[in-house]
Amino acid sequence: MENTIIANRLAALREVLRREKLDAFIFPSTDPHNSEYTPDRWKGRQWISGFDGSAGTAVVTADAAALWTDSRYFLAAADQLEGTEFQLMKLKVASTSTIAEWLGTQLRERNAQVGVDGMVNAESSVEALVTDLRRQGGITVRTNYDPLRDIWTDRPSVPDNKVVIQPLEYAGESTSQKIVRVRKALRQQHADGMLVSALDEVAWLLNLRGSDVHCNPVFVAYVIISTSDVTLYINKEKLTPEVVSYLASEGVGVRDYNEVEKGLKDYFEYNILMDPHQTCYTLYNKVHVQEIVRRPSPIAAMKAVKNAAEIAGFRKAMLRDGVAMVEFLKWLKPAVVAGGQTEMSIDHKLTALRAALPLFKDISFDTIAGYGSHGAIVHYEATPETDAVIEPRGFLLLDSGAQYQDGTTDITRTIPLGPLTDEERKVYTLVLKGHIQLELCKFPDGASGTQIDALGREAMWREGMNYLHGTGHGVGAYLNVHEGPHQIRMEYMPAPLHAGMTVTDEPGLYLTGKFGVRIENTLIIQPYCHTEFGDFLKMDSLTLCPIDTAPIIREMLTTEEVNWLNEYHRRVFDELSPLLTDESTVEWLREATKEIE
């Protein structure tokens, strides 16, 4: 059945492309700040295609349309693109053409021109695209036109939500101290100043938080740092008198958000650091200096290493979150047996339990509650059309988290709701083995996440099984639930791991049409030992919540793995039980955390 809404949007797009003499247009998933999750105003790829996943690129020509996305969204994208012109292009699958290759086959005539909006594409992405398209018969790129201005008639405006101060008791370091550190890092890279584009970096630097992006406590703004000034570019309606006074006290000037181009044109230093992977193409080309220092922002690495106050906040937030999870898990199975529960209803139940806790601000991402075969859809989100009734059998995969003012949580548990097959038990145990091996990991300071990723996969690799998503990502301190620069994944990620970094541990296995299993804790990297070979690090779980032992095939676990699980459960009980007010819940937790032999 044809999706007439998307068809009408494509027709309107093609009309303006003909007027502008453009042969194709590319819609990324990003905004002017290269955000993973964007304010509604910049969800152009979703608007033109109907696909609402967090990652993907839509490309439209005069007579064809295609959408590229990764393995997390293959099933969801196929469903959402049904009835549209869009062809699903599966990234990292050998037979999938690149965007440039596909355009080369679609635009065979010479002198074809492809449009991209330079405000929502990173400079490095545009430069790579220019090179790749030049090889496809000399296709050129235009960057100064946004067709959505003409065809998206009810396009949301730039958010104007108020900004709030993140108190020093949670931030652990003042803005003025952070600015000193940033300037020192800039000098080490022989840079006089920098443009701060990433929204979470702006929020961290200024100890401010906002609500412009769903689930992420950030706000739309830029910061320009020079040797003598720090200027925030923001819609001034977002600033309360308290915030204005606070910024002045920290030596931060304020200009209107739309004046950032002028700020770059007026920037007077010899050089400026601009991350070509983070800075949008348009702003990158507005600055007039002797030299652009093309390096990553130093703020990302600073923000990734949590200070004592942030670590303490994480631990307190995880205790509260653990209480909510225990209360939810105790409620879940009897509720499923009683009947009437669905994926969306249990999501609402868990969110309500969290929302009743002190310092709760929001969820940290849309809950993934996948029952049965829905658990095999890596980033599944239930809708009224897909909302499955949960029955007392099989697995429920539940990936959820919360934003508390003192910390951000991210946890996944795969919960058996009744009888399981041998295949389900085997897959569950393989995933658990991978999870435990990363928890047990010891590694040199400065190793990268790629170097330890195989620990989470080795047991399943022996069985000829694998997963295509990353194994771990950083987590912000009341900031974005996905935080870099470090990651644990198969693809080479050179960012070093250091003590004080948070990272998730979330291996999984997904059997399409059957079920999925993922087990996730958020960890903190800590010092382990110092030897003649250098400093070594270890992992410590911040997340406190039972891991269901019923599906485990005991013979598949090593003694070391059993000992880790028993010790983790002792800690979960010892730390959470004093916070539980109901004795029956304490007894439930005692049973859920009892030792396995």
Image (cartoon, rainbow, N blue to C red):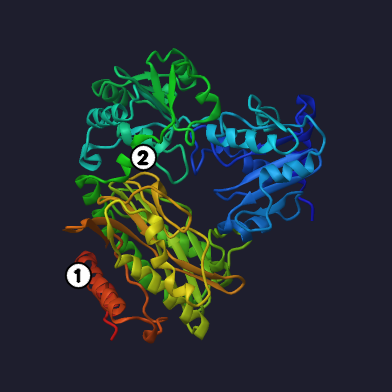
Quarter location, residue 224: top left
Q: Which numbered disc, 1 or 2, marks the residue that appears first in the sequence? A: 2
**418 or 107: nearer the eye?**
107
Q: Could you tell me if residue 5 is visible in this image? A: no
Mark carried by residue 574: 1
Residue 206 % position (x, y): 31, 31
Question: Left or right: 535 with respect to 217?
Answer: left
Tell me the amino acid under the disc marked 2.
Ala
Q: Position of residue 348 (x, y in %)?
A: 46, 59
Image side of residue 60 versus residue 482, left or right: right
Q: Nearer the viewer, mark 1 or mark 2?
A: 2
Mark 1 Cα within 10 Å, few/some/many (few <14, many 20+)? few
Pointer 1 with pointer 2, Cβ within 8 A = no
For disc 2, the neighbor class at 10 Å (few under 14, some 14 to 19, many from 20) is: some
Q: Residue at x 29, y 17 (%)?
A: 228
Residue at coordinates 51% horizontally, 68% vertically from top-left? 466
Q: Is residue 326 above or below residue 10?
A: below
Question: Can you identify the residue that label 2 sits on?
Answer: 300
Between 270 and 253, the one nearer to me in the picture: 270
Q: Is residue 346 above or below residue 339?
A: above
Residue located 39% across and 38% down the image? 200
**The C terminus, quarter of image:** bottom left
Farthest residue, direction front: 532
- Residue for point 59% across, 33% down: 126
Query: Looking at the picture, which amino acid does disc 1 mark?
Result: Asp
Instruction: Looking at the picture, tell me which residue is in the foreground, 338 or 161.
Output: 161
Real-space CA distance between mark 1 and mark 2, rounded to the nearest whole angstrom: 35 Å
Q: Is residue 417 shown left or right of residue 118?
A: left
Disc 1, SS: helix
Position of 112 relative to 303 (above/below)? above
